[in-house]
Image (cartoon, rainbow, N blue to C red):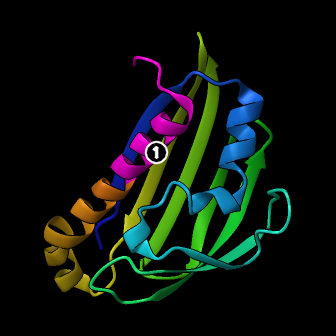
Amino acid sequence: MKIYQVHTTQRLPINMDTAWNFLTDPNNLKTITPNYMGFEILSGADREMYTGQLIEYNVTPVLGIKTKWVTEITHVAQKEYFVDEQLYGPYALWHHKHFIRPVDGGVEMEDLIHYKIPMGWLGQLLHPILVKPKLTQIFEYRRKKLAELFGELPA
């Protein structure tokens, strides 16, 4: 089965503390997720991020179908990176690395996601017409929302 990848970077004119505190607070996911996704945290967002943390939420990614998603924070390196992996949800595999590093005038955020689509060859057929465009749309919304909240540095 094919493994797909999404890779994004964005530079924000904020300091490391502000970036880290915003990005590691699961409650901020709703702010940077499109409203049509119906993002709702059910449990696990009541503490500062830590390795082993489970976060359970509902999303409505496509066709109005509400889906439960459970992720585990599998790695945390304070003010450097964290990794979330889907334990249960719409993907056969979801591994999302979030890197944060200082740059002149602010920070650079980098997201690297590896994912697999369920349903074998049918999932692979649907990927370019349904899944990839939806992920592109979600991460573009995230980019715009972060720029709206914090501003943006040139790349």
Q: From which residue to which does the magenta span run?
A: 139-155
Q: Position of residue 145 (x, y in %)?
A: 46, 45
Q: Is residue 72 above or below residue 140?
A: below
Q: Position of residue 18 (x, y in %)?
A: 73, 33
Quarter of the image with the C terminus is: top left
Q: Position of residue 138 (x, y in %)?
A: 37, 58
Quarter of the image with the N terminus is: bottom left
Q: Examine the structure image and report whether residue 141 is included in the region drawn in magenta.
A: yes
Which residue does the numbered mark 1 point to in the structure image?
A: 145
Q: Residue at x 25, y 62 (%)?
A: 132
Q: What's the magenta bit mostly, secondary-structure-wise?
A: helix
Amino acid of disc 1: Lys
Is label 1 in a helix, a strand or a loop? helix
Q: Is residue 128 above or below residue 7?
A: below
147 left or right of 49 in image: left
148 and 1: which one is in front? Answer: 148
Q: Residue at x 43, y 58 (%)?
A: 114
Q: Examine the structure image and report whether residue 120 is included in the region drawn in magenta.
A: no
